[in-house]
Amino acid sequence: MLTVGVDIGGTSVRAAVVDGEGRVLAEAAAPTARAASALDDTVVELVGGLAATHPVRAVGLAVAGFVDPDRRTVAFGAHLPWRDDPVVDRLAERLALPVVIEHDANAAGLAEHRVGAAAGASVAVLVALGTGIGAALLIDGAVFRGAHGVAPELGHLTVVRGGRPCPCGKSGCLERYCSGSALGRSAEELVAATDDLSVLRAAWERAEPLTGRDVARAAEQGDALALRVVAEFADWLGQALALVADVFDPDVVVVGGEVSASAPLYLERARRRYAEEVTGNGHRRLADIRTAELGGRAGVIGAALDARERAGG
C-alpha cells in the first residue's frame, strides 16, 4: 500500500509517495500559495501528479499550524492562508482519496518513531530546531496532542522573564534563545558588545542579519566568538532537555530540524548540561538523546505513514 505525504510549510509544499517501510519513491514540490483556494489547488496538483504514476490509497497532510482535535480542520497557521478551514473534507472530495491531517512536528515525530531515531521508544520526544522550535510527544507510539490539539508547545515556554520578544506575542520564549534564528540574534548581540575579532563582524557591520548557518560555519572554522555563541546555545538546549525530562520522563529525545545538521558542534555539551540540570541528577536514568535520522523528509514520511495507519494499511 502506497500513500502520499504532503508537508505544507510557510515557504514550500513538498509531496512524496511513501511505502510501508518509510521509503520515498517519488517527490514533487511547489511554492506555498498565499490564498486558501490556491493552496488547495497546489496540494491537488502535486498529489494528482504523483497518483498518476503510483497506485496511492490515501493522503496525509503535515501542516505548520494548529489542527483541531477532530483532525479535519486547520484552525490557524501563521504563514498559511487557511483559517478555521475544513481542509480534510474539501481535499478528500477533490482527490477522491481518504485524507488525514497532522501538525508538522507531530508528523516528523511519528516518522522518527516508526522508521527513524526513536524506533521502539515507549516515551519519545522530538525537539525540532529550526527558525523556531517544534516539538512532538509520542506515548506508546501514539501522538499526544493535548485537549485542544496544540500540545506540546515547548518553544514558547518562558525561560527569561522580560526577555527577547517573540513573534507569538510573549517575551523570553525558549525559541528566542535556542533555535536557528536565536543563534543569529545571539551572535549579533555578542559582536555589538565586544571588540573580539570574528569573521561574523564584517557582515554585522554591513547591517546584514546573521543567521544560524553563518554562526555554524564560523564555528566550524574555529571562530572564537562563534564558538561562544554555540556554547551558549548548547547550554540553553541542555536546560530545555532537562525541562522535557522533568515533565515527560522520556526514554528517547530526538533532536531534529535544520540546526541538527550542526549537532557535532553542540550536542555533547547539551547532553552534559542536561545531566547536570535534570531533577534528581545522578540518581535517575537519563534519556537517550539522539539526532534525527530522516532529515527534511520527516514531515512527508510521517504524514504518509499516518495516512497508511488510519486507512488500515
Image (cartoon, helix red, strand yellow):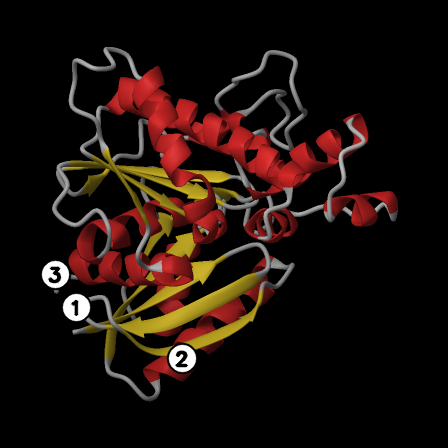
Q: Amino acid at mark 3?
A: Gly
Q: Which residue is mark 3?
A: 312
Q: Nearer the viewer, mark 1 or mark 2?
A: 1
Q: Position of residue 199 (x, y in %)?
A: 73, 49
Q: Alpha carbon of mark 3 to alpha carbon of mark 2: how far? A: 22 Å
**Among the two numbered marks 3 and 1 on one chain, the one whose residue lies closer to the N terminus:** 1
Find residue 20 and name its label.
1
> Going 78% across and 26% down the picture, which residue do you hit?
193
Q: Which residue is mark 2?
A: 48
Task: Determine whether the residue tagged by mark 2 lies in a helix, strand or loop.
Answer: helix
Say above or below: 246 vs 101. Answer: above
Furthest residue toward right: 206
Q: Amino acid at mark 2?
A: Gly
**Among the two numbered marks 1 and 2 on one chain, the one whose residue lies closer to the N terminus:** 1
Q: Position of residue 124 (x, y in %)?
A: 23, 37
Q: Position of residue 308 (x, y in %)?
A: 20, 63
> Going 12% across and 65% down the picture, which residue do you hit?
313
Q: Crowdedness of circle 3 by 10 Å Cα count: few (<14), some, many (20+)?
A: few
